[in-house]
Amino acid sequence: MKKLSLRTATLEGSNIMAHPGLKDGPIYLDYNATTPVDPGVVDAMLPYLSTYFGNPSSAHAYAQVTRMAMATAREQVAQLLGCIPEEIVFTSCGSESNALAIRGAALANRFHGNHIITQVSEHPAVINVCKSLARLHGFRITYLPVDKYGRIDPVELEAAIDEQTTLISIMYANNETGTMQPIAELADIARRHRVLLHTDASQAVGKVPVDIQSLGVDFLTLTGHKLYAPKGIGALYVRRGLQIEPLLYGGGQESGVRAGTENVAFMVALGTAATQAREKLTSSKARLQQLRDRLQQQLEQRLPHATHLNGHPTDRLPNTLNISIDGVLGEAVLEATPGVASSTGSACHEGNTEPSAVLTAMGLSRERALGALRLTLGRWTTEKEVDAAAGQLAQSVQVLWSRRDS
């Protein structure tokens, strides 16, 4: 693996030192896939792995410390979202949160109707839960189309609601393009029709302000490893008073919604990450947007008339750049650029590369979708890395062009 020295310096305008997991590796531009765990998060969770082991459900002294730690973590997550702690349910991941919200709300409210509305470009963690409800329980699923930017039309959402509609699930921000949906407007439509609304905000939380009161949603998913916490922890906001059917049955943990002895250390990690995100949000958003735009401008300058932005030009995550390059496959560009760790939205099956379902749903041609790169920035991305990544990617494209034309 090519060794780079760019990560040995502190971040510009920040006292955060380079992350040990990124030092001497390729330039990491895949923060939407997962984030490195923040060292401060590790420090906060370690005592609950090494010292404080008590089962929070016990009545003795060993349980008091872990029980208090859980309460603090729940409050920290609630503060980030602007809700009350009792509305936070800890889960193992975003996929579980999505399943708990969608399946749980659908089955608990089945006597009201059997119709669910989502969109064609949702994450598989939503799409596949909906498919299972249709297959196993006879629910009808409506998949709304998206426009060329990846947004649904609120008018089409309202037109799709009927007397049997019980739930709408629309993600806050797309993981591939960063396009953000008008969730508050969609929630207002749902509320007028007395339909519950769930949003998967895994990519949005910590990158843009996410305030429950302003959004008006009934359920909201967040994921720890998108937020500089470890993999294996997530949370679900459940509006107070709503009933959902559990996924896991057993004891009365998490107010009876999610059974299983609590993963206290990881809850502490998520709470700490939530506090960090809340404190850094304003400065982080501005810094990431500046770096994202710098990366886009450099690629456009180095590859004139050959780059195309995928996603909404303004209403998208500040860290996300999805760009297609003419005449190349995104996978081939990344293979030719070992100094950059990033991804495409394409899927490989038995040697065949298929274009991103998100991009094709937006109306992009197969060629343009296959030429896409998803470049996502984060807490440890620097200007030097952005400049170096743009140069390396552009050089790889030019080499691929020359091979094609020879």
Image (tube, rainbow, N blue to C red):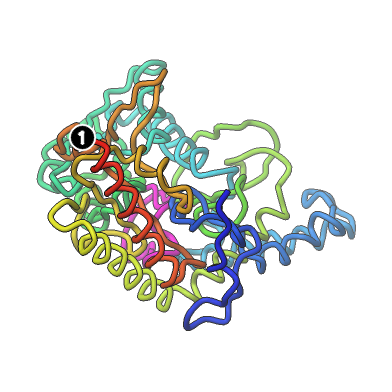
Depth check: give the residue in front, 306 or 395.
Answer: 395
When the figure is inspected, residue 57 is found, relative to residue 39, above or below; the finding is above
- The answer to whether residue 370 shows anywhere in this view is yes
- Front one among 38 and 163: 38
Residue 376 covered by magenta stretch: no
Residue picked out by circle 1: 360
Taking the magenta stretch, the answer to whether it contains residue 221 is yes
Task: Please give the range of residues in magenta.
Answer: 200-222
Residue pictured at 65% horizontal, 55% vertical = 267
The residue depicted at 37 percent of the width and 50 percent of the height is 218
Q: Amino acid at mark 1?
A: Thr
Residue 386: x and y in percent read 39, 66
Name the residue located 25 percent from the left edge and 39 percent from the top edge. Answer: 328
Quadrant of the rendered structure where residue 282 is? bottom left
The residue positioned 70% from the left and 62% from the top of the image is: 42
Question: How many numbered circles are shown?
Answer: 1
Specify the farthest residue to the front: 406
Q: Is residue 387 left or right of residue 315?
A: right
Return the x and y of residue 191 as percentages of the image width and height. Answer: 25, 50
Residue 393: x, y in percent?
35, 53
Mark 1 residue crowding within 10 angstroms, few (<14) / some (14–19) / many (20+): some
Secondary structure at numbered mark 1: helix
**Occupied quadrant, residue 86:** bottom right
- Work out whether residue 240 can be spotted: no
Image quarter (top left, top right, bottom left or bottom right) of the C terminus: top left
